Image (cartoon, rainbow, N blue to C red):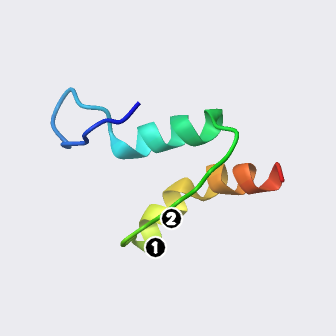
Amino acid sequence: MPSQFTAGKGSPSLLSELRRELAACDEVDILVSFITHSGVRRLLDILQSATAMG
């Protein structure tokens, strides 16, 4: 379900939503315009799990 992430109080965090969606999906397509090294580190465990599934 598409959502707008505003970083406001009461809004879901982008990190928590990405982790939840990546853990529950069958396939992942990612297009990134920019990302920081620290941003990748926060998702590294779930991305490794997703790619290990084949």
Q: Which of the image's four quarters has the N terminus?
A: top left
Q: Are marks 2 and 1 in contact (CB under 8 Å)?
A: yes
Q: Is residue 54 above or below residue 22?
A: below
Residue drawn 18% across and 42% down?
6
Residue drawn 75% across and 56% down?
51
Q: Which mark is residue 15?
A: none
Q: Which residue is mark 1?
A: 37
In 3D space, how far apart are the residues under numbered discs 2 and 1 (Cα atoms)? 5 Å
**Would residue 32 appear left or right of 6 to someone viewing this image?**
right
Q: Position of residue 14 (x, y in %)?
A: 36, 44
Q: Is residue 22 above or below residue 30?
A: above
Q: Position of residue 5 (x, y in %)?
A: 25, 42
Residue drawn 36% across and 36% down?
2
Say what secondary structure mark 2 lies in: helix
Q: How many neighbours does mark 2 have within 10 angstroms: few (below 14), some (14-19), or many (20 or more)?
A: few
Q: How many neighbours does mark 1 have within 10 angstroms: few (below 14), some (14-19), or many (20 or more)?
A: few
Q: Position of residue 22 (x, y in %)?
A: 59, 42
**Would residue 32 appear left or right of 11 to someone viewing this image?**
right
**Would residue 15 appear left or right of 3 to someone viewing this image?**
right
Count of number-bearing discs: 2
**Would residue 4 appear left or right of 26 to someone viewing this image?**
left
Q: Which residue is mark 2?
A: 40
Type of amino acid at the residue the image marks with label 2:
Val
Residue drawn 62% across and 51% down?
28
Q: Position of residue 11 (x, y in %)?
A: 24, 31
Q: Quadrant of residue 34?
A: bottom left
Type of amino acid at the residue the image marks with label 1:
His
Residue in front for this viewpoint, 14 or 45 = 14
Say what secondary structure mark 1 lies in: helix
